[in-house]
Image (cartoon, rainbow, N blue to C red):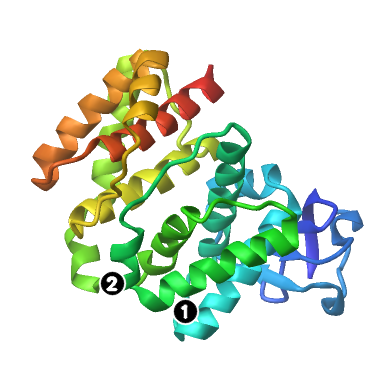
Amino acid sequence: MKVIKNINNNIAHCLDSKGREVIAFGKGIGFFKANEDIPLDRINRTFYNIKDSDYGIIRNIPTVIINTAIYIIDHVSDKLNVTYPSSKAISLADHLQFAIERKDKNIYLEQPLLQDMYQLYPEEMHLAEEALRIIQDMTGEKLPRQEAGTLCLHFIADQLDTKEKEHLDTATITEQCTKIIENDFSIQIDRDSFNYSRFVTHLDYLIRRLAEDRLIESENQTIFDELRKSYPDSYACSLRITEYLKEELKKEINNEEILYLVIHINRLISRIE
C-alpha cells in the first residue's frame, strides 16, 4: 500500500496494488512518508470510494471516535446480516462527534417516539442500546439514552426499499435547499467542504424520514423557542426550506424537525463565517 499523503498519525491516503485510491487505518501508519509502502500487516481497515467531503470528516474527528464508529458498524452489519457502504462508518463517526458536542452543551433532545421505534425496529433498537455502551467503553463518553433513537435511524437508513430510494431525487432536493441558504445569507457554500457534508447528511435523513412518515417527535418546545429567538435568521431560513420540502414531498414537517434544521443551518453558516 503506497502512501499518497498522511491524514493523521493513524490514517493515510494511499494507493493499493491496483492503483485504486483508498483510506487506510492502522496504528502509526501516518508516520510513513509519501511514496513509501506500508506493510499490509500494519493496516487494520481500508475504505474505498470515499467522497472528497469525507476527507474533512476523517481529518477533523478524533481517531478514537472513527474507530468506535467502525466497530459499531461492523457489529451491526454482522448482527443484521446487512452490508453497509464504506461511507456508513464515516457518517456515523460524524454523528457521534455531533452528539458529544450537543451533550457537552447540555442540549438534550427528547424522543417520545422511542417506544414506537422499539415496536417497529426492535432488533435495531437493541443494537442501538448496545452501541451506547460501546461508545462509553471506547471513548469514555456517556451519551443519553435518547440517542439510541438516532443511532437506530442510522442502522435502518440504508435498508430502505430500493423503489423508495429511486423515487426520491435527494440530490436535486438537497441542491435546492442549499440555494435557499445561499440566497438567505448571501454566501457561496463549498459543496466539497466537511461542514457541508455534515449538513447534507442531516438533510438526507430528514428527507427519508419524511418519505417514510416517521418524523422525530418530542416535547422540546422550550428548546425550540430558545433556538428560534437565539438564531432568528437560521430559523427564518429553516421555514423557507420547510415550505419547499412540504411542497416537494407533500408532507408536513413538525417543530422537532425544524429544531434540528435550525441547529444544522446555524452550524453550517457559523463555520463559513
Residue found at x 43% / y 39%: 199
Q: Residues within 10 Å of mark 2 (few under 14, many from 20)?
A: few
Which x, y percent locates residue 193?
54, 37
> In the rendered image, which quarter is residue 116 located in?
bottom left
Q: Which residue is mark 2?
A: 120
Badge 2 vs badge 1, beta-carbon distance below 8 Å = no
251 lies above or below 124: above
- Separation (CA) of disc 2 from disc 1: 21 Å
Lateral position of residue 57 relative to residue 62, left or right: left
Which quadrant: the N terminus? Answer: bottom right
Sequence-first tag of 2 and 1: 1
Q: Secondary structure at mark 2?
A: helix
**How many marks overall?**
2
254 lies above or below 129: above
Q: Residues within 10 Å of mark 1 (few under 14, many from 20)?
A: some
Amino acid type, residue under disc 1 in the picture: Thr
Amino acid type, residue under disc 2 in the picture: Leu
Q: Which residue is mark 1?
A: 83
The answer to which of 162 and 149 lies nearer the viewer is 149
Which mark's residue is nearer the viewer, 2 or 1?
2
Residue found at x 36% / y 64%: 157
Lateral position of residue 171 relative to residue 190, left or right: left
Q: Is residue 13 visible?
A: no
196 lies above or below 167: above
Which x, y percent locates residue 127?
50, 73
Which x, y percent locates residue 111?
37, 50
Residue found at x 81% / y 66%: 26
